């Protein structure tokens, strides 16, 4: 089982994340931000990742530190659970439709972080969260997991649907990328021999 647990404590946040990449989509998530909890539950369920998150942050200031730091810790947990990345498919791609919304996620577990963020929510806030903070979340996750991540909204008219489609698409694409390919015989999918 490819699992990891990461704990990170600062003066602004206290975060614990445990992930099993070979799970069944079971989760226990409490970030103090209900809408983010919902998005991370979708990520766990649709990616078949077992995920435990406990987070406390300075939400009296705003959601920024908590959301960014959860992205950091989740990225570290994914990277640690992957180990040397031997035998994985490495690339993942998924188009997720949700009612009027369609989001594409393409990613590469290359070790070279890069985020192309193309989500354009209709509203600036959702449940008192500045929607721009989801960019910060995915940026932090991308950097700490060494993930080249492209999230592109191709259609959409409702803010909740846009983020739900994005988290589901990310889950499905990551599930593909971390899955094993027997043809690799335990090798890394790279001419360099290392990711």
Image (cartoon, rainbow, N blue to C red):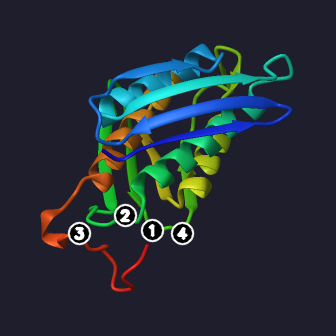
Q: Is residue 86 left or right of residue 43?
A: left
Task: Judge depth for marks 1 and 2 and give the one in front.
Answer: 2
Q: Is residue 139 above or below residue 183?
A: above
The Cα–Cα distance between marks 1 and 3, rounded to whole angstroms, is 17 Å
Which of the marked residues, 2 or 3, is nearer the chain's N terminus?
2
Which of the marked residues, 4 or 2, is nearer the chain's N terminus?
2
**Residue 113: image location, x then y, percent:** 56, 63
Badge 4: how crowded within 10 Å, few (<14), some, or many (20+)? some
Which of the marked residues, 1 or 3, is nearer the chain's N terminus?
1
- What residue is pinned by disc 4? 112
Q: Secondary structure at mark 1?
A: loop
Cβ atoms at labels 1 and 4 below 8 Å apart: yes
The Cα–Cα distance between marks 1 and 4, rounded to whole angstroms, is 5 Å
Q: Secondary structure at mark 3?
A: loop
Q: Is residue 180 left or right of residue 175?
A: left
Q: Is residue 181 left or right of residue 101?
A: left
Badge 2: how crowded within 10 Å, few (<14), some, or many (20+)? many
The Cα–Cα distance between marks 4 and 3, rounded to whole angstroms, is 21 Å
Q: Is residue 89 left or right of residue 156?
A: left
Which of the marked residues, 1 or 2, is nearer the chain's N terminus?
2
- What residue is pinned by disc 1? 110
Q: Secondary structure at mark 2?
A: loop
**Residue 123: image location, x then y, percent:** 63, 24
Check residue 186 in the rendering and tell me which mark sits there, or answer none. 3
Task: Judge depth for marks 4 and 3 and give the one in front.
Answer: 3
């Amino acid at each position: 089982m490819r699992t990891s647990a990461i704990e990170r404590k600062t003066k602004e946040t206290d975060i614990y994340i445990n992930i099993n990449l070979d799970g069944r989509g079971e989760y226990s998530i409490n970030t103090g931000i209900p809408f983010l909890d919902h998005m991370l539950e979708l990520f766990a369920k649709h990616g078949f990742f077992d995920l435990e998150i406990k987070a406390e942050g300075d939400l009296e200031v705003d959601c920024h530190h908590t959301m960014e730091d959860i992205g950091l810790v989740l990225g570290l947990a994914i990277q640690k659970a992957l180990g040397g990345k031997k035998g994985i498919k490495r690339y993942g791609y998924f188009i997720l439709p949700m009612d009027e919304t369609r989001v594409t996620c393409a990613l590469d577990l290359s070790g070279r972080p890069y985020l192309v963020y193309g989500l354009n929510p209709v509203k600036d806030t959702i449940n008192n969260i500045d929607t721009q903070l989801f960019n910060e979340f995915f940026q932090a996750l991308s950097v700490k997991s060494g993930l080249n991540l492209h999230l592109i909204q191709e259609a959409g008219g409702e803010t909740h649907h846009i983020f739900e489609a994005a988290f589901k698409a990310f889950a499905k694409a990551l599930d593909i990328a971390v899955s094993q390919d027997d043809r690799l015989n335990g090798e890394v999918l790279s001419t360099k021999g290392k990711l």
